Image (cartoon, rainbow, N blue to C red):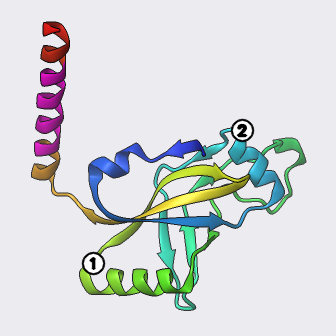
Amino acid sequence: MKIIAKNKKAYFDYEILEKFEAGVVLTGQEVKSVKTRGLSLKGSYVTIDERREVFWVGANISPYQPQNCPQDYHPQQPRKLLLKKSEVRHLIGKIKESGLTLIPLKVYTKKGKIKLEVGLAKGRKKFNKKELIKKRDAQREIRRALKGGV
């Protein structure tokens, strides 16, 4: 499994409750572009429409060869995600009942296919973020002290 892109900010801004693996519907040139690191997860999110289809919105996949790119190609167009029906039903229920959101966590390849890890997340408050920073700093100091003492 080769990780192509990670959404590091997601783990800081959100508390990830569950993770799901989804296939991504891409054109041939988009696959080549993603595999050569032409992808940005910044500002992207996942939605479910009224027909129970899941879409990845706001991901910027730059054209593989800009001069040979189709005229109607938009780098930030919504891309369909492939999930099991049971997973989609579960996600719809969770989003409606408790006000959770779906965010992309990372893009990777698995057996030659492009996969997206989607997280069911709850937003963190500012004071929770400060606590998280304090915990990380304390753990870092403990690790440094242990390495220095050995």
Quarter the C terminus occupies: top left
Q: Position of residue 32 (x, y in %)?
A: 78, 46
Query: Secondary structure beneath disc 1?
Result: loop
**Which residue occupies the extreme bottom position in the image?**
51
In the displayed structure image, the side of residue 65 where residue 62 appears, left or right: left
In the image, which residues are magenta? 131-143
Check disc 1 and report the residue beneath it. 99
Image quarter for residue 64? top right
Main SS of residues in magenta? helix
Residue in the foreground of this view, choosing between 12 and 77? 12
Q: Position of residue 17 (x, y in %)?
A: 30, 65
Asked if 107 appears above or below 67 in the picture, the reply is below
Going from N to C along the chain, the mark reached first, 2 or 1, is 2
Residue under the image location 20 percent in, 58 percent down: 124
**Which residue occupies the extreme right position in the image?**
68
Query: Which label sits on residue 146?
Result: none
Identify residue type, mark 2: Thr
Residue under the image location 44 percent in, 47 percent down: 7
Q: Where is residue 114 in the image (x, y as percent from the top left)?
A: 67, 55
Residue in the foreground of this view, choosing between 140 and 105? 140
Q: Position of residue 14 (x, y in %)?
A: 28, 57
In the displayed structure image, the side of residue 99 where residue 148 appears, left or right: left
Find out whether residue 141 is within the magenta segment.
Answer: yes
Asked if 96 appears above or below 147 in the picture, the reply is below
Identify residue type, mark 1: Gly
Residue under the image location 32 percent in, 50 percent down: 11
Image quarter for residue 91? bottom left
Residue at mark 2 to residue at mark 1: CA–CA distance: 36 Å
**Which residue occupies the extreme front position in the image?**
150
Check disc 2 and report the residue beneath it. 36
In the displayed structure image, the side of residue 9 where residue 41 appears, left or right: right
Residue under the image location 55 percent in, 77 percent down: 54
